Image (cartoon, grey):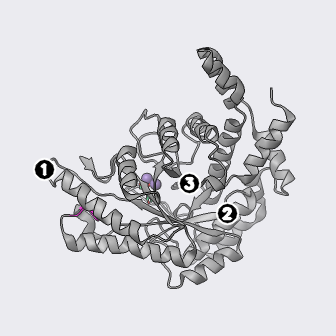
Amino acid sequence: MILLSDLTAVKAALRAQRIETPSWAYANSGTRFKVFPQPGVPRTPEEKIADAAKVHELTGIAPSVALHIPWDRVDDYGALTKYAHDLGIEIGAINTNVFQDEDYKLGSVTNPDPRIRRKATDHLLEAIDIMDATGSKDLKFWFSDGINYPGQDDLRSRQDRLAAALREAYDRLGDDQRILLEYKLFEPAFYATDVPDWGTSYAHCVELGPKATVCIDTGHHAPGTNIEFIVAFLLRQGKLGAFDFNSRFYADDDLMAGAADPFQLFRIMWEIVRADALDPSYGINFMLDQCHNIEAKIPAIIRSVLNVQEATAKALLVDKEALFAAQQNGDVLGANAVLMDAYNTDVRPLLAELREEAGLDPDPIAAYHRSGYQEKIVAERADGRQAGWGA
Ligand code: LRH
Ligand code: MN
Ligand code: MN
């Protein structure tokens, strides 16, 4: 049973929750087979930020947007930041990109050629300059580096080169800036990836120091991986910095968070709640990293934010005392039932009430469709210069 006092705490936690949306999710995207362009898609970083502001206006919990460089490269980052602030948006994580250049065919920071390593590391340092100009505190690294064939390059030397580049970037960080090191099992490399798993990321972060933390992209694991275990472990070590939320059925599918496996998202959020790590003051950046190839982008991003919020609300409803008592008593079925009771609670009325109390529409997606924003951007952005995933 949920007491009224508990509900007050649950609502307070939900009011404080923050989810960061990715600039590239607003742009055109596709698979390597085809990009299906959509009308009204942003043409510039400013227009991506404007769309992010719309998502925040309707959900109330998405006040920052992650940028990807060079996709969001501009001449004046101060002006871009001011533009964002005027719309009530902060610049979130700066994502580096050392995977879309001819030079990086054999790797970026792990490339055997020191000239190419220098070029890649300089890009990481450039991203810190952008953080200085935008006020961003998070520097996200994902390295596509890896090899396709056994013997193609020396696995151990590549780790040494990776460590050297990370060290150079780490030493350039300001006091309130940090590295988020993302891992991914495979793709584009098919035999060995240089940062393939949380253990590799974790070990590099420990070696670097307190300003380096792991980013968990929920789509970057082998099927069947227990992601909530990774969450629990990294939280215990104080090394979980961020999430890239998305759903996967097969590999790095980048579908809407909570679409493929809402129960997994709940289990992850329960570990967060269990560790009292939900509040922004704890320092975890809860980001989305998604592509909306066939569905309307802004409604899909709103849906994803709401899915994370629903999973969080359910996690907050777990009766901790009953759960810990059942665990202590070795009551296997009882403990499982406590968790399932929370998961099976329909939290949609609670969240609708929460939004109404905050002066928001209880149904953000319906509110978007009524708002006229989609018609406005389709009319305004009709010159065919739409930004793509990678442009
Ligand atoms: C790599 C990744 C990483 C990139 C993003 C576009 O698969 O998850 O976070 O920056 O996709
Ligand atoms: Mn990612
Ligand atoms: Mn990915």
- Of label 1 and label 3, which has the lower sequence position? 1
Query: Where's residue 207, x and y in %?
Result: 36, 54
Considering only order in the chain, which callout, 1 or 2, is on the residue closer to the N terminus? 2
Separation of marks 2 and 1 at Cα, in angstroms: 47 Å
Q: Which residue is mark 1?
A: 151
Q: Nearer the viewer, residue 360 or 237?
A: 237
Which residue is denoted by mark 2 in the rendering?
Answer: 63
Residue type, numbered disc 1: Gly
Q: Reply above or below: 248 against 385.
A: above
Under mark 2, the amino acid is Pro
Q: Find disc 3 in the rendering and name its residue.
A: 288
Report the residue at 81% width, 48% height from top. Answer: 354
How far from the left and from the top, in percent, is residue 293? 51, 55
- Asked whether 350 falls inside the magenta stretch, the response is no
Magenta stretch, overall SS: loop
Q: Secondary structure at mark 1?
A: loop
